Each structure stands twice: as structure tokens, then as C-alpha cells.
């Protein structure tokens, strides 16, 4: 039987300044552990700690630009583009441009604070990890 999800749950976000996470499907809003689906709105200048998650993440940028810094460089993903990050890869997300970004993120298995493995210190945006 289909399950209607009439509204998301707002999830506290890592990073500064704060972004808005609206979880539609996942551990909190629907009780799903196999997949999560969230609508993100990140302001200009937002950055979060690097992470080495235990899940694959599929991201579709709807508006603005999302920057991914990874162990060997960085990648800018713009509106209408998507990116896949694989579990076990070190990745750091940011929205450095004035308009920020809006995007959809799908994590398999679902996002969990215990499986994201965020760095303890803030990232250095001028020094990609090697």
C-alpha cells in the first residue's frame, strides 16, 4: 500500500552558517533505514566539516552551485547537474557563491549521524585533502 508523506521533518544541520534540511524519507521522518531523501537549502558561504560516510549519496542541484572538495581536488556542481559520491570517500560540501544552493540528496543506506563520520576540525577551504 502506498504511503503518503505529507510534510518533511526539519533536521538540524552541521556547518556554518546553518542550512535547512527537510527530510521526506529517512530514519527520522518515515523510519526508513535503507534510503533517505532530503531537500536542502544552503545559504551563501555555508560549509560543513569533511566526512567519510558509510553510504552512497546522489545529489541533484536545483538552484545555485554546490562545491564538493575531495581527497584529490574539488568539483563544482551547478543547477541541472548531479553528482554521486561513494561510501568510504572523503568529501566536504560547501556553497561559496552569493546565491547559495538548493538541492536534493538521496543516501543509500539512509543518512545517520553515526555513519557520516564527520571530521572533528573545520575544513580548510584553500587546502584540499591529499
Image (cartoon, rainbow, N blue to C red):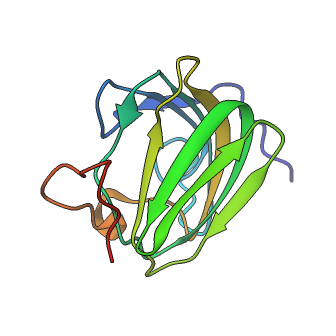
Residue placed most toward the observer, 94 or 125: 125
The picture places residue 128, in percent across and down from the top left corner, at: 35, 63
- Establish if 61 lies above or below 84: above
In the image: residue 28, left or right of residue 51: right
The picture places residue 2, in percent across and down from the top left corner, at: 85, 49
Which picture quadrant has residue 53?
Answer: bottom left
In this view, the residue farthest toward the left is: 121
The picture places residue 130, in percent across and down from the top left corner, at: 33, 78
Which picture quadrant has residue 62?
Answer: top right
Count of numbered badges drawn on the protein: 0
- Establish if 52 lies above or below 17: below
Which residue is found at the position 28% from the left and 51% from the top? 49
In this view, the residue farthest toward the front is: 126
Which picture quadrant has residue 71?
Answer: bottom left
In the image: residue 125, left or right of residue 101: left
Which residue is found at the position 39% from the left and 72% from the top? 90
The picture places residue 121, in percent across and down from the top left corner, at: 13, 54
Which residue is found at the position 50% from the left and 78% from the top? 87
Residue placed most toward the observer, 64 or 28: 64
In the image: residue 107, left or right of residue 92: right
Which residue is found at the position 58% from the left and 18% from the top? 99
In this view, the residue farthest toward the bottom is: 88
Amino acid at each position: 500500500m502506498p504511503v503518503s508523506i505529507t510534510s518533511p521533518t526539519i533536521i538540524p544541520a552541521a556547518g556554518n552558517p546553518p542550512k535547512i534540511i527537510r527530510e521526506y524519507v529517512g530514519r527520522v521522518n518515515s523510519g526508513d533505514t535503507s534510503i533517505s531523501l532530503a531537500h536542502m537549502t544552503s545559504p551563501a558561504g555555508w560549509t560543513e566539516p569533511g566526512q567519510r560516510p558509510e553510504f552512497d549519496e546522489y545529489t541533484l542541484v536545483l538552484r545555485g552551485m554546490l562545491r564538493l572538495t575531495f581527497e584529490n581536488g574539488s568539483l563544482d556542481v551547478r543547477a541541472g547537474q548531479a553528482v554521486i559520491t561513494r561510501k568510504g570517500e572523503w568529501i566536504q560540501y560547501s556553497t561559496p557563491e552569493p546565491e547559495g544552493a538548493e538541492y536534493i540528496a538521496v543516501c543509500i543506506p539512509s543518512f545517520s549521524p553515526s555513519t557520516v563520520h564527520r571530521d572533528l576540525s573545520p575544513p580548510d577551504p584553500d587546502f584540499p585533502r591529499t
